[in-house]
């Protein structure tokens, strides 16, 4: 994500959904979404304040949606938040990972919204053709960038909107930060250097997607090209200040260790040593103990409307 926080949970693995996801099984950018389930869930739970504020903003323009589609829902944390924010709406969570949709259904049941919650398993964007009704709100959070041809996917998303329906895309923003510039060990600026490696990883990930097509990530322009109008953009701050809670610390440790797996080999040896110390629970300088650990990021939502 250019750098979204998604980077934090998206790293190397072997296959997606029990089958190779990229053109070459074993690429360091293939995603194992099933394996990432718990981390995606923890992340979305921790980031709930951001989603709630984004939904309050959406609700000003999207009044009384009948059907909300969460395209690339993952484990359904956000889908369930939609169910709570729009109590009259039916929610359909769409994803290509069966196990993640199972988590979504279990969550909907726990939250008492199962009676108006459905799931649809398949590959975006084609699977949207299976929806029984057009969507009043189609939300795609950090999922579009996993599709090879984003422009074509946006056109397909737009086609599944009801007249007057809204497409809301969460893409971009600012990279997450967990630590100050100078942490007293290693060379200052470690997270900025990790961020640069993540950007390269992201570029490789996109290039290796099936049917990958380069696109300038000017989302309002792409939304307009998909036949939509009335584009709006707003960013939401995620600000969990130091000293981090245990939950936030656990998330930071998981996110950094995924980063270590994905980009560790490309780090210079000093930075690798610093990162290993940050991840070692027995080290007082690790993110498990240090008082300066925080979670700070920004998420951008772009919306556009299908002409009525
Ligand atoms: C980074 S996760 C985002 C999950 C959730 N929207 C969120 O913001 O927390 C990307 C999701 O897109 C799904 N996904 C990736 N490629 C897909 C495809 N081709 N078709 C359907 N879903 C896909 C993955 O299974 C995963 O659940």
Image (tube, rainbow, N blue to C red):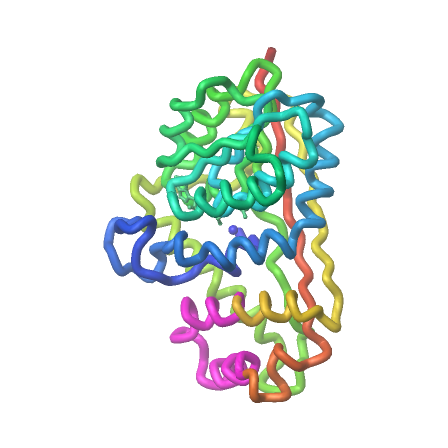
Q: Residue at x 38, y 41 (%)?
A: 96
- Location of residue 197 with respect to 61 vertically, above or below: below
- Location of residue 285 with respect to 167 vertically, above or below: below
Q: Is residue 267 magenta?
A: yes
- Location of residue 51 with respect to 220 vertically, above or below: below
Quarter of the image where one finds residue 203: bottom left
Q: Quadrant of ligand 1?
A: top left
User: Which contiguous range is marked in magenta?
Assistant: 255-280
- Give x and y (percent) for residue 46: 64, 56
Q: Nearer the viewer, residue 296 or 35?
A: 35
- Give x and y (percent) for residue 306: 57, 18
Quarter of the image where one finds residue 281: bottom right
Specify the farthest residue to the left: 24
- Give x and y (percent) for residue 27: 29, 59
Left/right placement of residue 47 relative to residue 262 reads right
Q: Is residue 273 magenta?
A: yes
Q: Dividing the image into 4 quarters, which one contains the C terminus?
A: top right
Q: Is residue 35 visible?
A: yes
Q: Is residue 222 visible?
A: no
- Give x and y (percent) for residue 272: 47, 81
Q: Residue at x 68, y 73 (%)?
A: 293
């Amino acid at each position: 994500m250019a750098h979204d926080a998604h980077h934090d949970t998206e790293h190397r693995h072997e296959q997606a959904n029990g089958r190779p996801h990229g053109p070459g099984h074993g690429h360091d950018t293939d995603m194992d979404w099933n394996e990432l389930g718990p981390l995606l869930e923890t992340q979305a739970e921790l980031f709930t304040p951001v989603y709630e504020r984004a939904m309050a903003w959406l609700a000003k323009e999207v009044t009384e949606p009948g059907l909300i589609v969460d395209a690339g829902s993952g484990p359904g944390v956000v889908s369930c938040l939609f169910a709570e924010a729009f109590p009259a709406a039916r929610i359909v969570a769409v994803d290509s990972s069966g196990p993640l949709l199972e988590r979504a259904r279990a969550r909907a049941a726990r939250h008492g919204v199962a009676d108006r919650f459905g799931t649809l398993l398949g590959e975006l964007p084609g699977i949207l053709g299976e929806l029984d009704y057009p969507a009043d709100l189609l939300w795609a959070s950090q999922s579009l960038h996993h599709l090879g041809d984003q422009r074509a996917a946006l056109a397909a998303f737009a086609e599944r909107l009801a007249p007057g329906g809204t497409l809301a895309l969460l893409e971009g923003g600012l990279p997450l930060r967990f630590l100050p510039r100078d942490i007293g060990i290693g060379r200052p600026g470690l997270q900025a250097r990790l961020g640069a490696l993540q950007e390269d990883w992201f570029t490789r990930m996109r290039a290796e997607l099936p049917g990958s097509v380069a696109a300038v990530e000017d989302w309002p322009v792409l939304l307009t090209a998909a036949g939509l109008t009335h584009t709006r953009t707003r960013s939401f701050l995620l600000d969990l200040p130091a000293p981090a809670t245990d939950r936030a610390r656990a998330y930071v440790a998981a996110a950094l260790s995924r980063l270590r797996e994905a980009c560790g080999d490309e780090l210079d040896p000093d930075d690798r040593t610093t990162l290993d110390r940050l991840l070692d629970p027995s080290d007082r300088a690790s993110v498990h103990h240090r008082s300066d650990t925080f979670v700070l990021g920004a998420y951008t939502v772009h919306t556009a409307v299908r002409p009525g």
